[in-house]
Image (cartoon, helix red, strand yellow):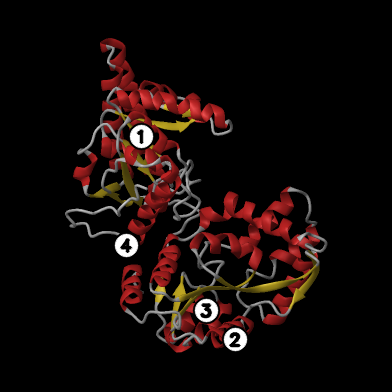
Amino acid sequence: MSDIATVLESIKFGPQGPQIAAFFDFDGTLIEGYSALVYIKKRIREGDMGIAELFNTLRTPFRQDVDEAAFTALFSDFAKTLAGSAEEDVRSLWFELFISRIARSMFFEGYELVRAHLRAGHTVAIASSATKYQIEPLAEEYGIAHILATELEVKRGVLNGNLCGQPLWGINKASAVKQFSKAKKIKLSHSYGYANGREDIDFLSVTGKPYMVNPHADLRKHGNANAWPELQFAQRKRAPIKAIAGTVGAYSAMAATMFAGMAYNKFYKEPRRTADMVGSIGTELGLAIAGIKVNIVNEHKLWEHRPAVFILNHQSKLDFFLFYNIIRRELTGVVKKEAENVPIIGPFLKMAEMSFLDRSNSKRAIEALQPAVDRLRRGLSVAISPEGTRSYTPRVGEFKKGAFHIARQAGVPIIPVVIRNAGELMWREDNAMRAGTVDICVLDAMDVCSWPEDSLAENIALVRQQFVDTLENWPAASAPEIKSFAIAKG
């Protein structure tokens, strides 16, 4: 079995350039499970699928002995359910399903492999029997430009219920990969393939560097006979018992610390000191119980400029634990208004003088930022995510201007804090914390007050790019210092 880190290294130091390709299967390889099941469940919930159709749908596609003819018949039936649908409506439907259901099942190891291939300048493509509509949202987030998928006929912007060619199942997927490679002048003998199912044996066989990902028994048998390396990606849909127990312990420790803090504050009337103690002690205990360690590059930069506006890329509920754990004292922040009324945590957030942001009302959102400015002027630091919400994938979202306006009004610097791996341990919709290590890199403080007003958007985009570049080229843990990229000043 191959180690992911070893494969990433081999990509980094192996042949570079677009003549090398990396082909990824979709269902079971880039995401756990089958995206089609999400659509089926939606139709069942809405009463759009009868018993006979449900039985016929479920009995075929998830078996490993299905041949091309059987799969084509099944997919033809699926295409008929979309007859009369506007193509853009189908595309929007799958985008909504990606956000609400599919994104949470993505394999982080797959994302790392995709990004490694893109950094190597390789031609990256998803090759799947699914439709392009199922794949497009993830491909866009990952930066994958090429999709080889089962095509549905579209006439005047409307799906007519017919297939356009053969589904990319079995030998058909292998043929599509070969045709694509010929057109793009790709050296298949030097290219990579990643897949999980028996039906992908033909596809993997046409690549020079095939990898089995969480393989089905038949694929593993064939792959082992041909010395194909195997990769194991961590399960996403169900957290292990250890993670559930650790999460319960972490929240219990945090809650107990909050109760103790409130008791302390009742007697001594020191809300600021109480908030600092609860934040530092509670998160230290919580992370330890959950089995989460924190590695920080340039930790000294957390202390060089106070007060400051600390900005972070936001992936997880775990970020709350992380930020209080590393900043520890004289910290407040900007959180969504819904958190104000959450039992236990709500009273603590008020004690910590958090600003509650109503994202549904832009005028009130702007007004909610003013208290943060006042607190900065009093000497407190503020933590905020310029993305505005947790990301659906590891890709850094677009930055909003609020954090930068706060810093400019208060006359304090911005300190970028780049977080890696938090989403892997606890993703956006997860309720369980998985044990592991979170990497954090603190970049140089920036004087945003010197930025001309007319270059604000440009400079904010450059700050976001610093996050992207740091995540793409993570510094060594022993590096003494990470220099931030120069920021334009007009």
Q: CA distance from mark 2 to mark 4?
A: 34 Å
Residue 14 position (above or below residue 325): below
Q: In the rendering, at what x and y percent does residue 45 appear?
A: 72, 48
Residue at x 63% of width, y 51% of height? 96
Q: In the rendering, at what x and y percent does residue 66 appear?
A: 66, 77
Q: CA distance from mark 1 to mark 2?
A: 54 Å
Identify the mark nearer the N-term, 2 or 4: 2
Choose mark 4 or mark 3, whichever is in front. Answer: 4
Q: Nearer the viewer, residue 83 or 238?
A: 83
Circles 1 and 2 in contact, beta carbons < 8 Å: no
Identify the mark nearer the N-term, 4 or 3: 3
Identify the mark nearer the N-term, 2 or 3: 2
Circles 2 and 4 in contact, beta carbons < 8 Å: no
Callout 1 environment at 10 Å: few (<14), some (14 to 19), or many (20+)?
many
Residue 259 position (above or below residue 168): above
Mark seen at residue 179: 2
State the SS at label 4: loop
Circles 4 and 3 in contact, beta carbons < 8 Å: no
State the SS at label 1: helix
Q: CA distance from mark 4 to mark 3?
A: 37 Å
Quarter of the N terminus within the rendering? bottom left
Residue indicated by mark 1? 407
- Taking 328 as reference, is 374 left or right? right
Callout 2 environment at 10 Å: few (<14), some (14 to 19), or many (20+)?
few
Choose mark 3 or mark 1, whichever is in front. Answer: 1
Residue indicated by mark 4? 473
Q: CA distance from mark 1 to mark 4?
A: 28 Å
What amino acid type should be assigned to the residue bearing mark 1?
Answer: Ala
What amino acid type should be assigned to the residue bearing mark 2?
Answer: Gln
Residue indicated by mark 3? 218
